[in-house]
Image (cartoon, grey):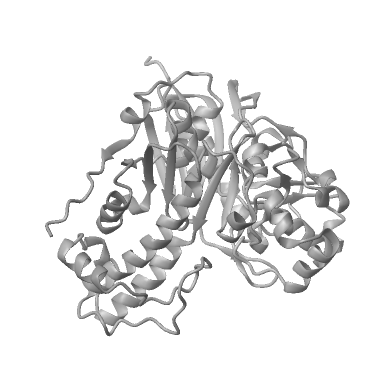
């Protein structure tokens, strides 16, 4: 009889893609499954994650591996997006939909919050959470308390989504640092405790005890002894393999729907100016802060590319074939101006009343202009995240590593750094597998597990 392969299971739950991975003891990928689950709606008709469909998908995958004669499951862990809370009653029943963090929050609720708890900018600075409504998951609790008091009264525990996924397997309610620390408006970074408002509103009673992100619970399923992790926030998880294998200071630019610049070597308190520039803190698994700055780049990019395709009569997807054109770039830079009106980005830039595409005879030229304007904001957010720390290397991962124009512009604007593109479809899953393991890793780890390319600075033939 062939020996069973020892594996770790990771459920990596993104907003769009739900992923299921098996890793062997050396973190090599053995199995990967992707799915997209249909959304449901909350009581206001707003689209949101279907928590029941998600549970079923997770349990089906788990049981199929448990029943598979080829594998012996040693550990399970979970990484997922933040800003999402699951509210349980005394009996452990789910009380509300999993509210979508893009759902708008009523202005009167926000006004009431600041009337009761003080200055907006001051609280944003202390909690390292620029005010973003539902995207500050702590605000969801305040919203529930004053919008749906009858539901709020029934809550026994509110779990961050990664910890809820762990709870499905362990029945234990816990909190952990990476989920508490991701723009939730809950944590006072200078005090290293929940913010005063959390105690004043008695919300602290609904937040389970905090355990380390590396904590795990030993349990047994069908005679198999399995170690179950408590879950981890996906941005902190994606950062972990870099932190564990690299000793010299670096910046990670994680690209996708958001472009997030993460600097684990900058633990300065945020300033008021940082907050106005959409800087925030994430938390490392040990509770230390990571300075980050973000903007809604991928979302804006998709909106604008759809408009370009419509204007120039191209199929959506045509943009993926566009390669960097040096002559085009230099020509556009000679008469640099703003031509795009951005719709989803709140960073300060020159506002124009509407996008002007008539100045560009071709799709390619308009596309280069779009990337130049997005890159201006990207440079700004990266510099904010670097601050005064001694960064030498910039790693870029996520969807934009396949974008030739973006990557060439990054290598050009950051030529005094070593800029590397890292390609790992494992993303945040790998960090979730690593955080509950005691295995040491070394400098060669990233090279083995990520496709890494050093970007060459552009030399223009002027």
Residue 364: give x, y in percent of width and height. Answer: 22, 70
Q: Give percent across and percent down for residue 164.
A: 66, 43
Residue 137 occupies which quadrant of the picture?
Answer: bottom right
Q: Considering only vertical position in the picture, is 27 above or below 49?
A: above
Q: Residue at x 56, y 53 (%)?
A: 279
| Residue 310 visible in rendering | yes
For the N terminus, the image quarter is top left
**Residue 17 seen by the camera:** no
Marker count (numbered): 0
Q: Residue furthest left?
A: 461
In the image shown, does 83 or 54 lie closer to the viewer? 83
Q: Identify which residue is drawn at 56% across, 38% down.
A: 78
**Which is more toward the observer, 270 or 361?**
270
Say whether residue 361 is left or right of residue 152.
left
- The picture quadrant where one finds residue 377 is bottom left
From the viewer's perspective, is residue 278 above or below residue 167? below
On screen, residue 327 above or below 211: below
**Residue 288 percent location from the top left of the image:** 62, 34
Considering the image in quadrants, where does the C terminus appear? bottom left
Q: Nearer the viewer, residue 9 or 261?
A: 261
Q: Residue at x 21, y 51 (%)?
A: 458
As displayed, is residue 227 above or below residue 89?
Answer: above
Is residue 262 rendered to the left or right of residue 117? left
Please tell me which residue lies in front, 349 or 198.
349
Residue 290: x percent and y percent? Answer: 56, 40
């Amino acid at each position: 009889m062939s020996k069973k392969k020892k594996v770790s299971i990771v459920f990596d739950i993104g907003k769009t893609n739900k992923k299921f991975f098996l890793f062997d003891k050396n973190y090599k990928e053995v199995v990967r499954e992707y799915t997209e689950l249909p959304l449901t709606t909350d009581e206001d008709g707003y689209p949101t994650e279907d928590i029941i469909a998600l549970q079923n998908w997770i349990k089906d995958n788990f049981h199929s591996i448990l029943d598979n004669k080829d594998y012996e499951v040693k550990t399970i862990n979970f990484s997922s997006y933040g800003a999402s809370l699951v509210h349980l009653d005394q009996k452990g029943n789910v009380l509300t939909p999993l509210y979508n963090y893009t759902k708008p929050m009523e202005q009167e609720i926000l006004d009431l919050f600041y009337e009761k708890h003080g200055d907006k900018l001051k609280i944003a600075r202390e909690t390292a959470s620029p005010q973003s409504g539902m995207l500050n998951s702590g605000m969801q609790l305040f919203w529930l308390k004053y919008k749906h008091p009858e539901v709020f009264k029934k809550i026994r525990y509110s779990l961050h989504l990664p910890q809820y996924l762990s709870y499905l397997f362990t029945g234990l309610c816990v909190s952990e640092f990476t989920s508490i620390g991701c723009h939730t408006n809950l944590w006072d970074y200078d005090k290293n405790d929940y913010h005063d408002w959390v105690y004043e509103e008695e919300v602290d009673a609904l937040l389970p005890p905090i355990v380390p992100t590396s904590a795990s619970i030993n349990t047994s399923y069908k005679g198999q002894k399995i170690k179950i992790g408590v879950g981890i926030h996906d941005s902190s998880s994606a950062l972990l393999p870099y932190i564990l294998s690299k000793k010299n200071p670096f910046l990670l630019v994680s690209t996708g729907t958001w472009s997030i610049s993460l600097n684990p070597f900058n633990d300065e308190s945020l300033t008021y100016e940082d907050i106005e520039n959409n800087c925030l803190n994430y938390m490392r698994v040990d509770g230390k802060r990571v300075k980050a700055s973000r903007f809604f780049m991928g979302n804006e990019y998709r909106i604008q590319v759809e408009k370009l395709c419509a204007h120039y009569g191209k199929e959506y997807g045509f943009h993926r074939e566009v390669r960097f054109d040096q002559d085009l770039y230099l020509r556009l830079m000679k008469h640099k101006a703003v031509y795009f009106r951005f719709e989803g980005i709140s960073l300060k830039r020159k506002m124009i009343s509407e996008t002007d595409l008539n100045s560009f005879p071709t799709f390619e030229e308009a596309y280069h202009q779009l990337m130049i304007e997005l890159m201006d904001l990207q440079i700004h957010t990266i510099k904010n995240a670097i601050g005064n720390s001694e960064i030498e290397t910039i790693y870029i991962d996520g969807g934009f590593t396949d974008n030739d124009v973006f990557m060439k512009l990054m290598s050009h604007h950051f030529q005094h750094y070593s800029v590397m593109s890292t390609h790992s479809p494992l993303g945040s899953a790998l960090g979730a597998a690593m955080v509950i393991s005691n295995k040491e890793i070394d400098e060669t780890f990233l090279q083995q597990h990520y496709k890494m390319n050093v970007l060459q600075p552009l030399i223009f033939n002027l």
